Amino acid sequence: MILIFDLFETLIEDISIDFNLGLKPLWEEHYKDKCSFDEIKAYGEELFMYMVSLHKQGLEFPFVKDELPMYAEKYGGDVIDMSIEEEAEFLNRCNEVKVYDGLNDMLGLFTEAKTPMYVLSNSGFRAGALQLILKQHGIEKYFEKIWSSADFGRVKPCPEFFEMAIGEILKQYPDTTREDIVFIGDTYETDITGAHNAGLKTVWINRKNEPDVNGYAAYQINTVTDLLNCPFITGRD
């Protein structure tokens, strides 16, 4: 069995999100002499709505590749060349996160059982930055690879994003098929629908006990560590 996890609200919990906590230091360093913080804050909100519109089309709006150049275009100056480490620092400022209780122990058990694990995330931040975030929380070591929509340019549930990940996994493990892959996520529309349409078994973290209107979830749990009770993953009834 091979496991692919969603990231936010699946492996790590967002305690708080405030993009302006990352934007303000960026403004102070690069744009303070070009505009007020209220101006760049309002523009950031405008770009957020633009990102939402792109997501509805199945497209990503990568922060470093696409968004940062738009600040430079609007306010002048050079496009900010942000390293992976700086990108992770920006993300840390915006998002206060924690891993779910018992997650480290569960991932350790799967690793001992030689279960390959991956992460497939909708995020405007590159996989390298997400990897650093997971490393800070002590769980990056459990995953063979992290894919971010910021690098691919498309978001879940679009089939191309899933097929990219599936193709790499099957190339790495040629004796397996997509029937051996399980996707675990918390969002029905993007995670469960997208993975089901890609031919994967799905485990839905259904915290609100919502109806599985399409019957796409092969198994439902309340929190990620309940995977230890999933029979087709553990092999236990």
Image (cartoon, rainbow, N blue to C red):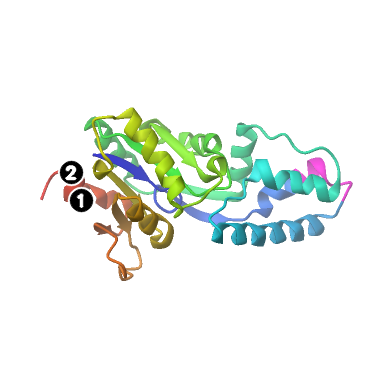
User: In the image, is residue 97 above or below residue 132?
Assistant: below
Q: Is residue 205 left or right of residue 82?
A: left
Residue at image mark 2: 234
Residue that protrudes farthest toward the right in the picture:
33
Nearest the eye: 114 or 86:
114
Where residue 84 sits: x, y (%)? 61, 33
Q: Quadrant of residue 196?
A: bottom left
The residue that appears at 18% across and 48% down in the rendered structure is 232
Task: Identify the element where label 1 is drawn.
Answer: loop
Tell how many labels: 2
Where residue 230 sits: x, y (%)? 20, 51
Q: Is residue 82 magenta?
A: no
> Three-letter amino acid code at disc 1?
Cys
Where residue 56 sits: x, y (%)? 55, 61
User: In the image, is residue 148 above or below residue 111?
Assistant: below
Where residue 63 sits: x, y (%)? 64, 45
Other-residue count near label 2 (Cα within 10 Å), few / some / many at <14 / 14–19 / ≥20: few
Q: Is residue 23 left or right of residue 190?
A: right
> Three-letter amino acid code at disc 2?
Thr
Look at the image and give the residue range highlighted in magenta: 26-34
The residue that appears at 19% across and 51% down in the rendered structure is 229
Q: Are marks 2 and 1 in contact (CB under 8 Å)?
A: yes
Other-residue count near label 1 (Cα within 10 Å), few / some / many at <14 / 14–19 / ≥20: some
Task: Identify the element where label 2 is drawn.
Answer: helix
| 3D distance between C-alphas at marks 2 and 1 | 6 Å
**Which label was assigned to residue 230?**
1
